[in-house]
Amino acid sequence: MQRTVLTPHPGALLRDALNAAFGDEAEAAWLIARGGVWVNGVRVRDPELQLPADATVVVQRPPDGVYRDPVVTPGMILYEDDDLIALDKPTDTYVEATPWDAEGHLRAALARFLEARDGSAPPLHLAHRLDRDTSGVLLLSKAPDVNAALQRAFHEGTVQKTYLALCAGRPAFDKIEIETGHGRGRGGLFRVFPREDIGRVLPQGGTVKAMRTRLNVVRRMDDAALVCAMPLTGRSHQIRLHLAFLGHPLIGDVKYGGPSAWRSATVQHHHLHAVRLELPHPRSGAALIIESPAPEWASQG
């Protein structure tokens, strides 16, 4: 949710502008502290900032109205050495700052955990990202000098990612490798494009990129299937998009046509879990395999 606030007069303090707009000093202070206030396109967290005459002040709030405050515990650490740390990411958790919140995300929570445990936190860099409701293996670097090698491994495809997905219906295929185009539609949402559109420049900006996924059916149920998904490219929402394109959207993935209820129960999040990550260690080159226990929904019959 976004709101633009008018600047009362040149030189007005940010705090006073928000107080006038919302009539609530506590709310204004909270919005600034969480990092949901932007002035001329820059996140501002100083309530004493003097606003220029032409300032555009935009206030961002969570789309669902919920501020999240994740906490990292020792049991969430799947792997750690001097260079890397991998977490077992829970659902309903952002991995990085959002426009409405600079604090309520997993990287910041991990920094707080490491500072409390070790006395200081190293610079943390996300090696990859998982959607808010996707659970499982999340890898971060702790040493800046391995970041280039780590990003190169992801970019060049030497990292193998394996997911478990619970999708609606009963797929006709046992194994399939699908390639389509990937890009944003006119409304801004990611969508599947025909394969022949790969490389086409879109009128709304951006280029259609190749998107390839390997899918294996692990188990069929009466009304759903457990699928092992291996993305061969790294596009946003890739597995979700391809399963929806095949007519089998994820259980709980209402954005892409999945059911919001399953077996007479409301589903709070889409059922996608990053179960395994394989890569060469960015410093030693040794094979590294990190696994996360399968979630409860993966064992349902």
Image: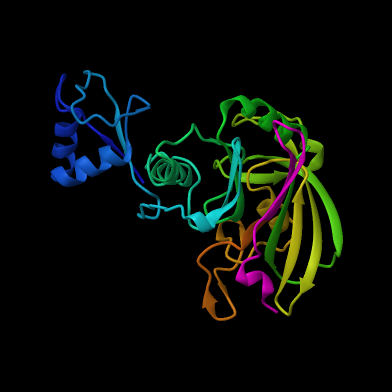
Q: Which residues are magenta?
A: 275-301
Which quadrant of the figure has residue 221?
bottom right
Nearest the viewer among 187 and 228 is: 228
Residue 159 screen position, x and y as percent = 75, 41
Up the image or down, 27 lies above or below 224; here it is: above
Assess whether residue 119 is covered by the magenta stretch: no
Nearest the viewer among 3 and 220 is: 220
Residue 149 screen position, x and y as percent = 69, 28
Which quadrant of the figure has residue 174?
bottom right
Left or right, residue 65 beside residue 185:
left
Up the image or down, 128 lies above or below 240; here it is: above
**Residue occupying the point 53% across, 63% down:** 269
Residue 208 visible from this viewpoint = no
Q: Which coloring applies here?
A: rainbow
Residue 208 screen position, x and y as percent = 71, 34
**Residue occupying the point 61% across, 44% down:** 190
Which quadrant is the C terminus positioned in? bottom right
Up the image or down, 167 lies above or below 76; here it is: below
Residue 110 screen position, x and y as percent = 46, 45
Residue 263 visible from this viewpoint = yes
